[in-house]
């Protein structure tokens, strides 16, 4: 039997999407991915979902239908509550075995990568260092803080591409700042977390940020205690990688930038003591005194950790804020 294929454009409501999922379910299909479903539903709510996305049906001789591709799309329509214009493709098959063979072909199709998508929209020629800027923008979209919901939202390609537009000039400035600097230093600055901080500072404080990142990358006689030197030393000694490490490195970049912005020295980068996202001179600000409070806590903890008679240190949260608790061996007491 020769296959007959037809197609039509359908305006699918959440109710219709639920009905199709219930009546046309293909038992042999893979389980629904919660992460993929969340991403698609967010795209629909934000108006970023691609209209005309296809849903592929196998039509059996008795007229019943099986969804071979597009289950996540229909689930997302139902979950988001936002109707979508989709294209339904109907392929008449001889039996369920033929439907299964078609389904298997969908699962092995090669997905378009971020690189493919960037090339398709021409972004690789419009923005400097696109494959470095792209993950950094994703980190910014997550608010520099890891959570499943934010991570899934940042996976929307359309949203990420739109968010990249304001960073066209900052990316070009950073590329110019790095030009001619040692390759390892360029690699440090273009790590996801550090890159995200660099883009934000260059966006809102272009002159000062250009001075900061250019001097850091070239390190032409930076003295010890200079926040740029301190950040460079920290990054050169840190080998952590991955998305979670990026959040830590971003905080180290923030500490160095905040000290430089205030004209203060910085002896050590201690990103783990940061409890607030603060990039001075940008919209990323917190309540007055937070930066000073965290810097003070970091220094107290560092000094206490150097004492031989130290018993323990900790943080106590009170209604008035956070205070450091330093405990010593009772037999000796503090020196």
Image: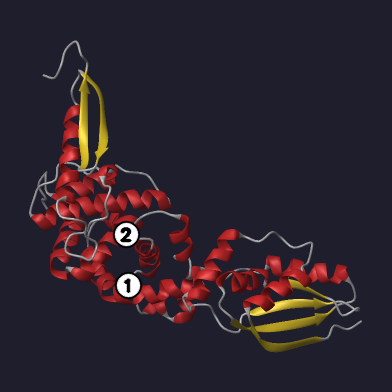
Above or below 152: residue 264:
above
> Residue at image x 19%, y 10%?
331
Q: Decide which of 318, 299 is in the foreground and name it.
A: 318
Is label 2 in a helix, a strand or a loop? Answer: loop
Left or right for 301, reference 34 = left
Quadrant where the image shows the C terminus: top left
Name the residue: 62% across, 72% down. Answer: 78
Q: Which residue in the structure is indicated by mark 1?
A: 128
Q: Is 307 placed left or right of 71 in the picture? A: left
On residue 190, the disc is 2
> Between 6 and 234, which is closer to the camera in this rendering?
6
Is residue 219 in sight in this rendering? Answer: no
Question: Is residue 10 placed above or below 149 in the rendered structure?
Answer: below
Q: Give the residue at the far front of this rendering.
A: 319
Q: Gap between marks 2 and 1, in whole Å?
A: 12 Å
Q: Give the side of residue 140 with respect to residue 291, left or right.
A: right
Q: Quadrant of the N terminus?
A: bottom right
Colour scheme employed for the rendering of this structure = secondary structure
Q: Horizontal and vertical percent for residue 328? A: 20, 20
Please tell me in which quadrant of the rendered image residue 258 appears: bottom left
Q: Residue at x 63, y 76 (%)?
A: 14
Q: Is residue 54 something that shows in the picture?
A: yes
| Residue count near mark 2 (Cα–Cα under 10 Å), binned few <14, some 14–19, many ≥20 | many
Q: Position of residue 255 (x, y in %)?
A: 21, 50
Q: Nearer the viewer, residue 56 or 85?
A: 85
Q: Position of residue 260 (x, y in %)?
A: 12, 55
Secondary structure under badge 1?
Answer: loop
In the rendered image, residue 265, in percent from the top left (x then y), is placed at 10, 47
């Amino acid at each position: 039997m020769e296959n007959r294929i037809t197609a039509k454009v359908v305006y699918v409501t959440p109710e219709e999407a639920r009905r199709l999922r219930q009546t046309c379910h293909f038992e042999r299909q893979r389980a629904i991915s919660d992460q993929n479903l969340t991403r698609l539903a967010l795209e629909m709510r934000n108006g970023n979902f691609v209209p005309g996305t296809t849903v592929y049906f196998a039509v059996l001789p008795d007229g019943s239908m099986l969804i071979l591709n597009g289950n996540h799309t229909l689930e997302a329509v139902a979950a988001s509550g936002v109707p979508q214009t989709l294209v339904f493709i109907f392929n008449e098959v001889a039996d369920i075995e033929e439907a299964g063979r078609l389904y298997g072909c969908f699962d092995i199709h090669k997905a378009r990568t971020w690189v493919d998508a960037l090339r398709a929209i021409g972004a690789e020629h419009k923005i400097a260092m696109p494959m470095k800027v792209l993950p950094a923008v994703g980190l910014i979209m997550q608010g520099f803080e890891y959570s499943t919901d934010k991570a899934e939202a940042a996976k929307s390609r359309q949203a990420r591409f739109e968010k990249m537009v304001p960073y066209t000039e900052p990316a070009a400035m950073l590329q110019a700042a790095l030009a001619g600097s040692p390759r390892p230093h360029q690699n440090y600055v273009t790590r996801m977390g550090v890159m995200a901080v660099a883009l934000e500072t260059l966006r809102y404080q272009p002159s000062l940020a250009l001075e900061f990142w250019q001097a850091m990358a070239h390190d032409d006689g930076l003295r010890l205690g200079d926040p740029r030197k301190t950040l460079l030393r920290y990054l050169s000694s840190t080998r952590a990688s991955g998305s979670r490490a990026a959040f830590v490195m971003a905080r180290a970049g923030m500490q160095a930038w905040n000290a430089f912005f205030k004209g203060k020295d910085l002896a050590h980068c201690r990103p783990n003591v940061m409890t607030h996202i603060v990039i001075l001179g940008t919209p990323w600000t917190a309540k007055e005194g937070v930066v000073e409070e965290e810097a003070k806590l970091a220094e107290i903890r560092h000094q206490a950790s150097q004492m031989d008679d130290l018993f323990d240190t900790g943080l106590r949260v009170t209604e008035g804020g956070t205070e450091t608790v330093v405990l010593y061996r009772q037999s000796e007491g503090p020196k």
